[in-house]
Image: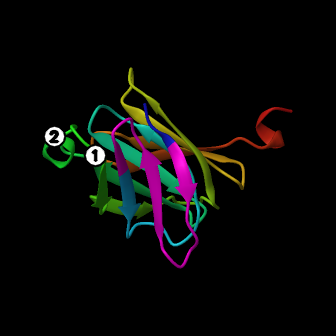
């Protein structure tokens, strides 16, 4: 099971997640705190940050194949993209049925991303004017 271990300062530009027998340090993607991440499957992970960016990560089986002892892995993202019209990505969630990622930003937008292409395909303002 994976869970957020720590969110490091902007200076280090890395965050770590802990698994049962290894630690993943994901670096060189975000310039500010990582607020959330979600798994797309056993290998792909998406993170959202206060820098308004989304990052896609691939954790290959080769990277964590030897589970006999605890390990520490540094990983770089596959790609990093700005969340259009987003201000500080606060939460990310994956919908496996539609293969979409939803990202919530602090300015009240829900951003929809295609998980296959990692491209933003839409956005919806979730503020009061939609619900009144």
Residue 79 lies, in percent from the top left, at 31, 60
Q: Please determine whether, in this image, residue 49 is positioned above or below residue 100.
A: below
Q: Residue at x 36, y 52 (%)?
A: 24
Residue occupied by mark 1: 117
Secondary structure beneath label 2: loop
Along the viewing direction, whichever of 27 and 83 lies nearer the viewer = 27
Q: Residue at x 71, y 49 (%)?
A: 108
Along the viewing direction, whichever of 88 and 7 lies nearer the viewer = 7
Along the viewing direction, whichever of 54 and 108 lies nearer the viewer = 54
Residue 66 lies, in percent from the top left, at 16, 41
Label whose residue precedes the other's in the sequence (1 or 2): 2
Q: Which-is-in-front pick, marks 1 and 2?
A: 2
| Residues at marks 1 and 2 touching, judged by CB atoms closer than 8 Å | no
The answer to whether 38 appears left or right of 80 in the picture is right
> Residue 65, which numbered label?
2
Residue 8: quadrant of the picture: bottom right
Please, which colouring scheme is shown?
Answer: rainbow
Q: Please determine whether, in this image, residue 11 is positioned above or below residue 64.
A: below
Q: Which residues are magenta?
A: 4-23
Q: Residue at x 86, y 33 (%)?
A: 132
The answer to whether 67 appears left or right of 16 in the picture is left
- Residue 10 in the magenta stretch? The answer is yes
């Amino acid at each position: 099971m994976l869970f957020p271990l720590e969110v490091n300062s902007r200076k280090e530009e890395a965050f770590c997640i802990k698994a049962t027998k290894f630690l993943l340090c994901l670096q060189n993607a975000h310039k500010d705190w990582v607020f959330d991440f979600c798994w797309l499957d056993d290998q792909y992970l998406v993170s959202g940050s206060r820098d308004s960016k989304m990052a896609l990560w691939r954790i290959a089986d080769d990277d964590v194949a030897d589970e006999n002892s605890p390990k520490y892995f540094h990983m770089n993202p596959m790609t990093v993209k700005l969340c259009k019209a987003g201000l500080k990505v606060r939460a990310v969630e994956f919908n496996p049925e539609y293969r979409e990622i939803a990202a919530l930003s602090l300015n009240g937008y829900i951003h929809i991303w295609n998980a296959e292409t990692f491209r933003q395909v839409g956005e919806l303002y979730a503020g009061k004017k939609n619900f009144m």
